[in-house]
Image (cartoon, helix red, strand yellow):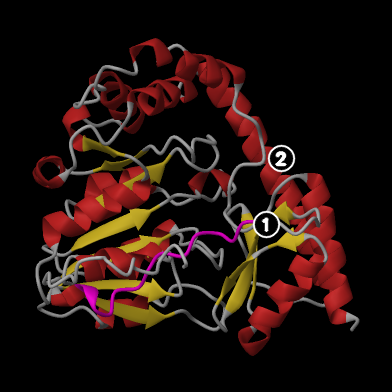
Amino acid sequence: MSETSPRPDAPVETIRLRPALEDLPVYVPGKPPADDGIRRLKVSSNESSFPPVPAVREAVIATLDEMHLYPDAAGIALREALGENHGVEPAQIALSNGSVSVTADLVRALVGEGDEVVYAWRSFEAYPLLVGAQGGTSVQVPLTADAEHDLDAMAAAITERTRLVLLCTPNNPTGPSLSTAQVEAFLAQVPEHVVVAIDEAYREFHDPATVLGTAGIFRRHANVVLLRTFSKLQGLAGLRLGYAVAHPRLAAALGQVAIPFSASRPAQAAALACLEPTVAEELERRAEWVRTERSRVQQALAAQGWELPASHGNFVYFPLGEDTPAFAEFADARGLVMRAYGTEGVRATIAGQEANDLLIEIAAAWRSR
């Protein structure tokens, strides 16, 4: 009997689930390596390839003797530090266990049955799940031929039922990012009562000289909310800590719908440690390494003849269409586990140099078949 098979003597369930769950997609995490004796490197989840910064590790360990106590539900120290970083009041910072949970709070605060959420597709895998779970309607606007947001089409997709627009930049999984001018032009077309969330989970991997000027955008537009995470560059994916920077009314609403104690004591301590100057400097060195390594990989792939989207995240994307499953299997058989998206494309994390060299080798072997 399998783990999912009911026992012969199990009672018959007659519970009534919400109709919204009938067609709700299930989040598919990055594929883990198969346990078949073959050594594989995992580049399917956009995790940091760096170990924890020692000061961050020590901050987490220091909380373990208090694990029997609830964390600070208000996250006062962390919200004060983040508020100072962003030039906002601490009350404008909403914490949760990862930016995906903050996004879920945002949907709960804004979206009711039949309300619409506009976002590019393909984009972050969790968006349709979060919207559908709330009974909302996803309005997925296809990416351009260059795998970028089609902002004019997204603006045209806004209706009287639209409550929220999600902009993922750099876009996961394809990699292109939005400029300040593009976002400002888009916001000029969006009604002021429609919230525009700028999801910047991969912001730190963008060239700092040209990264989106979200601080100014936020100051100029009362309907903009910023979403950030400590999971990627900071390497806290296993601890889960994300946050939103919101204007006061929306920030208060996020507090109303948030699950209490969702930012754990170790996660808050780790995040605070990440904001310390010496740790922040080390993290920036790591970000620069990833940017340099990403450039090396992109140049090597271009030399092989690949035409890939311009990625500004810690990953590259192969828009392979119908060849997507075959390419993922091809890579898996050669020791590299990537993330396949149906029949659209494959994403590979910029990981350690060994994994990146193997990615280049596999890509070359695929083209020379």
Q: Is residue 205 above or below residue 183?
A: above
Residue plotted at (25% across, 60% down): 196
Q: Quick check: is 153 in the magenta stretch?
A: no
Tell me the chief SS of the magenta region.
loop
Identity, as a three-letter code, of the amino acid under mark 2? Trp
The residue type indicated by label 1 comes to Pro
- Highlighted magenta segment, given as a residue range: 21-34
Q: Give the quadrant of residue 287.
A: top right
* 100 in relation to 15, above or below: above
Find numbered disc 1 in the image and state the secondary structure of the residue it sits on: loop
Give whichever of 153, 162 is nearer the camera.
162
Q: How many residues crowd around disc 1 within 10 Å: few (fewer than 14), some, or many (20 or more)?
A: some
Secondary structure at badge 2 equals: helix
Q: Circle 2 is placed at which residue position?
A: 289
Say whether disc 2 or disc 1 marks the residue closer to the N-terminus.
Answer: 1
Residue on which disc 1 sits: 33
